Amino acid sequence: MKAVIYTKYGSPNELIYTEVEKPQPKDHEVLINVHAASINSWDWDLLRGTPFLVRIGGVLKPKYTILGADIAGRVEAVGKEVKQFVPGDHVFGDISGCSWGGFAEYVCASEKALSLKPATITFEDAAAIPQAAVLALQGLQVKGLIRNGNKVLINGAGGGVGTFAIQLAKLFGAEVTAVDSVTKLPKLQALGADYVMDYRKEDYTISGKKYDVILDVVGNRSIFDCKRALSSDGRYVMVGGTMPRIFQMMFLGSLISWIGTKKMGLLMHKPNHTDQNELMALWETGKLVPVIDRQYPLGDVAEALRYFGEGQHTGKVMIRVQ
């Protein structure tokens, strides 16, 4: 089968489009003929090996030689212990919790990571949802504790997580401020953001406005700067960020939350059926729409990741496998 592999950390130049052996499912696994996959920040981080935390399990070289966690495709075969799926089923899911390997014609994954894909949604739209939308949902609903009328700020709102988060926050009844580069702001307004902010011209941490929930997708500001922008009982949730900011949040977030009314924490991503199916139900009723910036064929994964790494995309960057 065709796949895009890498054997050492580095730039997209390390990626090789080549022929590899087709995987065989274990007892609890499903073999999927991949039709579409999407790029997430974790793919970019794993490719480069930064921040260093992503090297757990593969300090000197990658543990998984094929990137890609969000997939949608057709079940080709199932292991003898699989009970939820049969060959021919159309499925989608985030396989980062059990394996990687989505940037290939076939991949094996635990049935626990997968959900049935409705016939009415394309493989591309289905593959755009699992990781980014689940992160947005968990960050806003589980950690953020959004209530109707809350003021919510999304820092880095133009990416996959952010574009889903805008739509979800509006569904929860929040007033949404979206922060990103100026070229992305019209699209963020079209998605429902009440206010938009060009991060190069405005600093939300010193504007004087207070937010009940801050969902931080880029994690590029000091924890103390972000704390200043929270309301008296506000919640700050970091979804991604630089290594110094992640460590700062890990060591100081709990302390700040313990000694005061403002709560600050790092979201621990938990892929699961329940969230995937809830998000798919929102798609089926027209309340949630994946924003797809560009699509690339499997052989152009290196170019797709190069474009993703530039940070100019709005929404998702997709890989068409079939």
Image: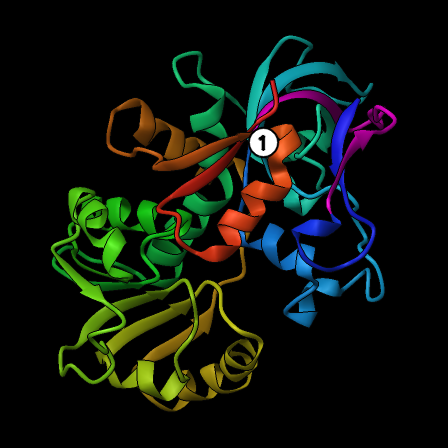
Along the line of sight, the residue nearer the viewer: 119 or 36: 36
Q: Quadrant of the N terminus?
A: top right
Along the line of sight, the residue nearer the viewer: 222 or 292: 292
Residue at 72% x, 13% y: name it: 76
Q: Quadrant of the C terminus?
A: top right
Range shown magenta: 15-36
Q: Mark 1 = which residue?
A: 71
Residue 174 coordinates in the image, percent (x, y): 16, 55
Residue 170 coordinates in the image, percent (x, y): 19, 48
Residue 216 coordinates in the image, percent (x, y): 37, 66
Above or below, comparing residue 143 to residue 170 in the picture = below
Image-quadrant location for residue 36 = top right
Residue 180 coordinates in the image, percent (x, y): 29, 61
Residue at 50% x, 34% y: name it: 318
Residue at 70% x, 50% y: name it: 13
Q: Helix, strand or loop at disc 1?
A: strand
Along the line of sight, the residue nearer the viewer: 228 or 163: 163
Image-quadrant location for residue 256 = bottom left
Residue at 20% x, 58% y: name it: 147
Q: How many marks?
A: 1
For badge 1, the amino acid type reads Ile
Above or below, comparing residue 203 to residue 24 in the picture = below
Is 17 a magenta residue? yes
Instruction: Decide if residue 107 is on the left or right side of residue 318.
Output: right
Image-quadrant location for residue 25 = top right
